[in-house]
């Protein structure tokens, strides 16, 4: 269970950025839902998930090999935790909050 707890940035499933990822995507998607999406939910989710995947790819391909990241992430933190748990969860919760108003 060392991959899960205690949380160590760069070595575990969740890291110190997990809360930031969730909070940002809740804030961002709630605002987009109110201001722009207005029912175009799946288009927005696919677009922003594509952006998240692209960012993780840039981190892995460019930033980490060039030493621009203090703590390189393990693959399951980058591809599973960051994108499909934190970001997708944040997107869905943010849209739900906006629609519940």
Image (cartoon, grey):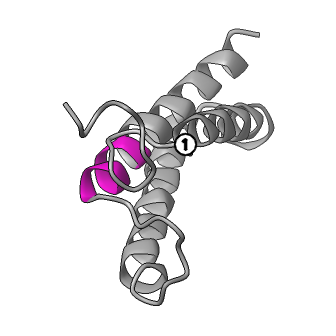
Q: Secondary structure at mark 1?
A: loop
Q: Position of residue 63 (x, y in %)?
A: 49, 81
Q: Nearer the viewer, residue 88 or 40?
A: 88
The residue positioned 61% from the left and 26% from the top of the image is 95
Is 19 situated above or below 83? above
Percent coordinates x, y for residue 23 in the rendering? 66, 33
In the image, taking residue 10 as reference, residue 51 lies left or right, namely right
Q: Quadrant of the N terminus?
A: top left
**Magenta region, main secondary structure:** helix
Front residue (pair 14, 25): 14
Q: How far across and down, in percent of the image, does residue 64 sit? A: 43, 79
Residue nearest the viewer, comparing 67 with 50: 67
Name the residue at 55% across, 42% down. 16
- Relative to residue 2, is residue 38 drawn left or right? right
What span is colored magenta in the figure?
A: 75-82
Q: Is residue 18 left or right of residue 74?
A: right
Residue, far top: 100
Residue drawn at the location 50% of the way across and 62% of the way down? 51
At horizontal 33% and vertical 52% (from top left) the residue drawn is 11
How many other residues sit within 10 Å of disc 1, few (<14), some (14-19) or many (≥20)? few
29 over 94 or under it: above or below: below
* Residue 28 sits inside the magenta stretch: no
**Residue corresponding to mark 1:** 16
Residue lying at the far left of the rendered structure: 1
Q: Position of residue 46 (x, y in %)?
A: 43, 50
Quadrant of res 88: top left
> In the visual, does 68 lie left or right of 79?
right
């Amino acid at each position: 269970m060392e991959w899960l707890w205690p949380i160590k940035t760069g070595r575990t499933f969740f890291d110190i950025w997990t809360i930031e990822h969730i909070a940002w995507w809740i804030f961002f998607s709630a605002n987009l839902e109110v201001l722009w999406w207005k029912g175009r939910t799946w288009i927005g989710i696919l677009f922003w998930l594509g952006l998240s995947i692209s960012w993780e790819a840039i981190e892995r391909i460019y930033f980490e090999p060039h030493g621009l990241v203090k703590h390189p992430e393990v693959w399951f933190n980058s591809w599973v935790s960051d994108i499909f748990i934190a970001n997708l969860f944040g997107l869905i919760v943010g849209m739900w909050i906006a629609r519940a108003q």
